[in-house]
C-alpha cells in the first residue's frame, strides 16, 4: 500500500488543472483535497455556484451560462467563456479548453451524481479525452476512473475493488485479480473484480476504462507545493 500511496501522491502533485463539473459536489477527502490544491480550476457552468459559495474563485467558467446563477453570471462574467456548441457537453468544452492551453494532466471532479444520463456520458467521454492526448482521471467520492490503452500495471493492495469497462480492447488478460478477464462486450461484465496483491496488471490491445476504489486507503499526506 505504501507504493500505492506514493503513486497517488505523485499523480496529485503533477495535476496541471482541475475541471469541476456540474454534478454532485464532492464530499470525500481525496476529491476535496484535489480541489483545494488545484493550480488551476475550470468550472463547468453551474458547477461554479457551489464552488464560489464555499469561498473560492475559479480561474475560468466554461459553458453557455444557462445553469449559472444570475448573480454569479453578473459578478464573474469576465471569466465566463460562453461556448454554445451543442455537439459537446460542458465537461468536454472544459477539457478541450485546457488542451488548447497545453495543459494535459487533468483531474475531473463532480462528474457523477444528479442525473444518471449525465454521469454515464461524462464517464464514457474519458476515452475521447485519452484519444485527444489528455492524461486525465475522474475522481469521485468512491474511487478513480482511469482511461487506458494497451497493457497497464497499477499499484494496489489486497482487497481493493477493481472494475474494467471495455471499449475497443481485445486480448484482455489480468494478473493479480480474483476473476479472469475476457473480451467483455457489456460494461457490467468487468465490474466487481478484486486485487490480490500489491499491484495488478491488465494486458490488452485497445482502449478500456479502469475504476479503482479509494475508500480503503488511509489518509494521504498533504502536498507541500
Image: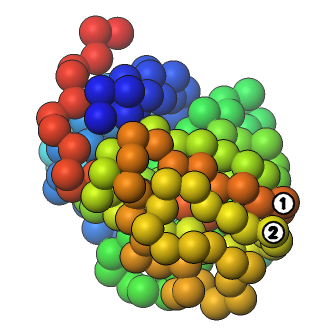
Q: State how far apart marks 1 and 2 are (Cα).
A: 6 Å
Residue with the mark numbered 2: 171
Marks 2 and 1: in contact by CB < 8 Å?
yes
Q: Is residue 99 left or right of residue 40?
A: right
Element assignment for label 2: strand
Residue 95 vs 140, above or below: the answer is above
Q: Residue at x 33, y 75 (%)?
A: 113
Residue 14, how many percent across, how many down? 51, 22
Mark 1 vs 2, N-terminal side? 2
Q: Is residue 81 left or right of residue 163?
A: right
Quadrant assignment, res 198: top left
Quadrant showing the C terminus: top left
Q: Is residue 187 left or right of residue 156?
A: right
Q: Residue at x 21, y 22 (%)?
A: 221
Count of numbered tags: 2
Residue 159, how many percent across, how many down? 28, 58
Q: Is the residue marked by circle 2 packed among few (<14), some (14-19), or many (20+) residues within 10 Å? A: some
Residue 4 vs 188, above or below: the answer is above
The numbered mark at residue 205 is 1
Residue pushed farthest top?
Answer: 224
For marks 1 and 2, give the one nearer the viewer.
2
Work out whether residue 8 or residue 177 is closer to the camera in this orientation and state it.
177
Work out whether residue 7 or residue 78 is closer to the camera in this orientation and state it.
7
Residue 8 vs 188, above or below: the answer is above
Work out whether residue 142 or residue 18 is closer to the camera in this orientation and state it.
142
Residue 127, how many percent across, how many down? 71, 62
Element assignment for label 1: strand
Quadrant assignment, res 171: bottom right
Quadrant assignment, res 54: top left
Q: Residue at x 40, y 76 (%)?
A: 192
Q: Residue at x 43, y 28 (%)?
A: 7
Amino acid at each position: 500500500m505504501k507504493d500505492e500511496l506514493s503513486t497517488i501522491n505523485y499523480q496529485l502533485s503533477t495535476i496541471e488543472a482541475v475541471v469541476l463539473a456540474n454534478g454532485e459536489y464532492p464530499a470525500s477527502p481525496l476529491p476535496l483535497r484535489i480541489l483545494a490544491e488545484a493550480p488551476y480550476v475550470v468550472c463547468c457552468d453551474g458547477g461554479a455556484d457551489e464552488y464560489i459559495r464555499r469561498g473560492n474563485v475559479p480561474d475560468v467558467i466554461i459553458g453557455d451560462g444557462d445553469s449559472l446563477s444570475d448573480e454569479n453570471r453578473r459578478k464573474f462574467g469576465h471569466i465566463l467563456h460562453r461556448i454554445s456548441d451543442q455537439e459537446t457537453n460542458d465537461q468536454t468544452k472544459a477539457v478541450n479548453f485546457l488542451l488548447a492551453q497545453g495543459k494535459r494532466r487533468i483531474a475531473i471532479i463532480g462528474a457523477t451524481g444528479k442525473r444518471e444520463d449525465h454521469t454515464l456520458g461524462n464517464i464514457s467521454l474519458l476515452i475521447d479525452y485519452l484519444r485527444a492526448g489528455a492524461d486525465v482521471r475522474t475522481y469521485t467520492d468512491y474511487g478513480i476512473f482511469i482511461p487506458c490503452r494497451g497493457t497497464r500495471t497499477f499499484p494496489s493492495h489486497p482487497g481493493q475493488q477493481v472494475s474494467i469497462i471495455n471499449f475497443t480492447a481485445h486480448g484482455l488478460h489480468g494478473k493479480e485479480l480474483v476473476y479472469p478477464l475476457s473480451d467483455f462486450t457489456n460494461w457490467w461484465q468487468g465490474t466487481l473484480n478484486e486485487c490480490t496483491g500489491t499491484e495488478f496488471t491488465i494486458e490488452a490491445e485497445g482502449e478500456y476504462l479502469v475504476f479503482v476504489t479509494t475508500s480503503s486507503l488511509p489518509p494521504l499526506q498533504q502536498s507541500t507545493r
